[in-house]
Image: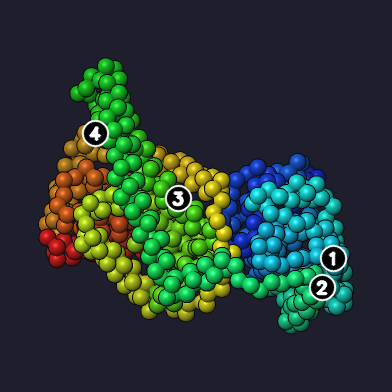
Amino acid sequence: MNCCEGLKIDIPKGAKKIVLAGNPNVGKSVFFNALTGVYVDVSNFPGTTVDVSHGKFGDDVVMDTPGVYGVSSFNDEEKVAKDVIIYGDIILNIVDALHLERDLFLTLQLIDMGKPVIVALNMMDDVERNGIKIDVEKLSNLLGVPVIPTIAIKGKGIDEVKKNLYNARVGNANPHIMKYLKDIVEKVEHQSEALLILEDDDEFLNAYGFSRMNLREEIYRLRRQAVDEIISKVIINDNEKNSIRQKLGYYMLNPITGIPILAVVLYIMFKVIGVFVAGTIVGITEETIMQGYYEPFVKGIFANLFGDNTVLYRAFAGEFGILTLTPTYVLGLLMPLVIGFYFFMSLLEDSGYLPRIASLSDKVLSFFGLNGRAIIPIILGFGCITMATITTRLLGTRREKIIATALLGLTIPCSAQLGVIAGMIAPLGAKYLLIYLVTIFFVFALTGTILNKVLPGESSHLFIDLPPIRMPRISNVVKKTWTKTWMFLKEATPLFALGAVIITFLSETNLLVVIQNFFAPFTVNFLKLPKEAANAFIMGIIRRDFGAAGLTDLTLTPEQTVVSLVTITLFVPCIASIIVMFKERSKKEALTIWLGSFIAAFLVGGILAFILI
């Protein structure tokens, strides 16, 4: 058996496979960036890596695996990591020094596999900050492999790891486990496969025709006992005095203090993004720069080239022109909002606050068939539904993934859409903001409750690491904000241009009027909006933020504004999101979510219009 064929990773002949392995949230991505120069998300919450990233280190191939607590097949991340780790030539095991007792379980399993291992003892600054000392030399001797202390996020120890990468060696395997392993090793290709057979891994039991040995618990007990013995010898001093950061972390988790802290954080986000960025900044970028200077400049060029009453002029520089509407919406209106949102998200991620929000929200989400871990894709959904849908892989069961995907597709607005919504609703006052929030939350709660009742099974229990609270690193925050904003621009711009072409085509052929008249019973009589609102919904099929941006061109009363924003929030997911939903879920489930969003959007919008207007 071999690795990487199913993962479609090209391994040059003679190249070594250097595999990064470790528990969730120990800093593997930082090492991957440092070794390969390829940027992947660096976050202070578990689950950043759900796929295998790969790059080059000299002539060899580096592979970054999802964070796992052991090499096994209990969930999707472990299956992906297992396929890469067991056939790796060199294992760079990243260990969280502050949680050494937890992380060494995986380290000893890697050593029992007979793999050349080198350990990066990361986050040593957290160890010192908490008054703990580790005898690194003794730890190295006990494990039988090189151990390098690092503070990867500050670049400390990275060069040392690079220099010693090829000094990785086979460590001191557990002698009791080796006795069990002796007979199996002779019948398989790799010692790593033999160990997994000993631990009753179904894939390798079937592949080699072995029967279950029912020794997994005994193997785990022996390994845990070995970890305890090592810890008792290498931890020199344990200062239990709580630091300010530990106390802050406690207050964030306690509902009595945690909920007010969360409310304050969300209020600050709303004031900065919804009021300052959506009002002041967008006023400059959209109205002053794009509409005041850019659009007249482009219109002047195309008027001179083609005349100002031609199809070509309207296609490129008209009301829905590719070179007017698209840049104005993407750069003038949405980009400042996206930057503002991702900046805050990066602060929350890097500080270690996100997992605490997950823990705080666990009990609430259990009413909807989820656990607190689902808060991570939900919060990420406020950035990008497409990315958040992929992150639902973190959830433990298919049932939880369906519920989370449906809630994302129906009720969670992405960052760009959220910015437009905040900008339109903030000037209306608290009353209309409250109506909007209560309506969306009602739909969220109703949908989650129904799915929780209808779908078979139960929600799994929350099991999540809580990283230490720390000051966000501005370099990481800026890099992450820029990277995600750039990804948004690359994904959104072609779709916005496509939308502009479609709208122009419909306008030139008068089909736009036909569609507006066709939907008039819905938009005018049912939603009580101007019939031109149909344009926004047509644009919303391509991207919901595109549709939301289209609403800014309409003259609406406060009540019509709330109705239109609720409808566009609940509207169908964008094209990119629905493609990912088809990939992550079955076709039937994805299609049901798309149609359900379409019906729910107009139904809820109509009911709200009946009440308000």
Instruction: Say if residue 207 shows up in the picture.
Output: no
- The residue to which callout 4 is attached is 319
First reached walking from the N terminus: tag 3 or tag 1: 1
Q: Disc 2 vs disc 4: Cβ atoms closer than 8 Å? A: no
Q: Which residue is mark 3?
A: 342
Q: Horizontal placement of 462 versus 325: left or right?
A: right
The kind of residue on which mark 3 rests is: Tyr
Which of the two residues, 268 or 25, is positioned nearer the viewer here? 268
Name which residue type carries label 1: Lys
Which residue was labeled with disc 2?
A: 233
Query: Which is closer to the viewer, label 4 or label 3?
Result: 3
The amino acid sitting under disc 4 is Glu
Secondary structure, mark 4, is loop
Whether pointer 1 and pointer 2 mark residues with C-beta atoms closer than 8 Å, the reply is yes
- Between disc 2 and disc 3, the foreground one is 2
Estimate how packed mark 3 is, as few (under 14), some (14 to 19) or many (20 or more) residues with alpha carbons within 10 Å.
many
Q: Position of residue 108 (x, y in %)?
A: 78, 69
- Judging by the rendered image, the residue that carries numbered circle 1 is 138
Mark nearer the viewer, 4 or 1: 1
Q: Residue at x 64, y 51 (%)?
A: 153
Among the two numbered marks 4 and 3 on one chain, the one whose residue lies closer to the N terminus: 4
